Amino acid sequence: MIAAIGLVLGVIAGLFLEPTVPTWLQPYLPIAVVAALDAVFGGLRALLDGIFDDRVFVVSFVANVVVAALIVYLGDQLGVGSQLSTGVVVVLGIRIFSNAAAIRRHLFRA
Amino acid sequence: MTASGEGDGGRPGWGTGPDAGPDAEGDREPVRGRARLLSAMHPRATRAQAVAALLCGVLGFAAAVQVRSTQDAGLSGLRQTDLVRILDDVSERGARLQSEARDLQETRDRVAGNDSVAALDEARDRARVLGILAGTVPARGPGIELTITDAEGQVGSDVLLDTLQELRDAGAEAIEISSVEGPAVRVVASTAFVDAGQPGSGAGVEVDGTLLAPPYRFKVIGDPSTLQTALEIPGGVLEVLDQRGAQGVVTQEDSVAITSLRATPSPRYARPADADQGSADNG
């Protein structure tokens, strides 16, 4: 519950503060968001499995974001930034879907 | 790619494939899952709840910021390679439009602009020059007048022809032959001289069908001094006339007016070979 409230508060803060994204961060923010979304879905699934651990959640959240950003950065340096971004998004999307499937099974037995 | 559970907050290597879940777990598992969710929904000030709330807040914040910047960002959010590509596209398009504009401008100038006026002027000039050569327009300019008095009737078509050729060699641009008191004939490329009677009879010379009686007069437009020199050279026209008992008098003029004309010949058989002119003729 507190997590959901935190999410809502974050969204509201983002909408109303209207911060400008620094230029150096602009290519990485969308990938980081998707990676974080993947971590959150994973955390939710772990919660339903009864194995949620806040330390692991924090580590996986940060690691996901950092690795995703790193991959995109590396791709930019190699000249394949947009392709690697697409690849990262695809992989994370697949993970999100599979996590969502597990969550769905827990909640609906289907 | 199967979900390995890595990064999902669970134990590493926990997750099997997505389809392995329900079969491997008991029937009571979903109930336990719901119970856990419900229990997690209860606000409790545990560390886990606080950390999850913080990270979810960060996620929400970042997502909202990203959505907003995506909505109002035109080019500022794009990466360098995309910007280069867009720049290339734009400059290529600009070049294409520029060349198109140039083409259209040329077309406009050709249709309505100065070019057609200039072309028309040039065509008129050409027609005028060709008209002088063909004898269809009057001509005026510096030149000479050569008067030949033939007291003994010894000047025939041969002498007149020699005189004419000498004048042409000297650069005469327009020539007219006349009787001093009679008709005048414009000399053109096809001009022919025929003796009207027996040589020495003084009956005159027929020039292009017109009978000219002596004395004769040549009106010539060209460089006056060159023409006069050409006639006066030793063994030249004036000397020949002298030998035949005739007399030639050359006078340089600042302005010689040649007014006699030739009808524009219309060829019966010959047609311009140029395709454009042919179609223009047909049209």
Image (tube, coloured by chain):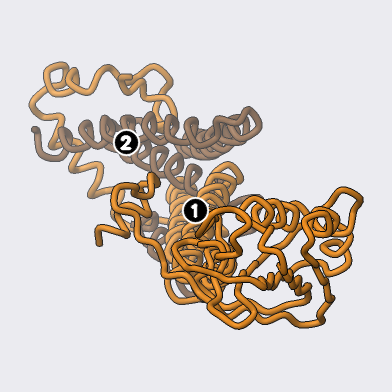
Label 2: few (<14), some (14–19) or many (≥20) C-alpha neighbours in 10 Å = many
Residue shown at the point (66%, 63%) measured from the top left: B153
Question: Where's residue B280, x and y in %?
Answer: 32, 59
- Residue B69 image offset from top left, x and y in percent: 49, 62
Q: In which quarter of the image is the N terminus of chain B?
A: top left
Report the front residue among A27 and A82: A82
Identify which amino acid the numbered label 2 is placed on. Ile
Colour applied to chain A: brown
The answer to which image quadrant residue B21 occupies is top left
Q: Which residue is drawn at 36% across and 20% down?
A: B4
Q: Is residue B19 visible?
A: yes
The chain holding disc 1 is B
Instruction: Give the vertical position of B27 relative to A29 (above or below).
Output: above
B177, above or below B70, in the image:
below
Q: Residue at x 57, y 65 (%)?
A: B204
* Residue under numbered circle 2: A96
Drawn side of residue A40 relative to residue B129, left or right: left
Q: Chain B is drawn in which colour?
A: orange
The residue under label 1 is which amino acid type?
Arg
Residue under label 1, please give it: B96
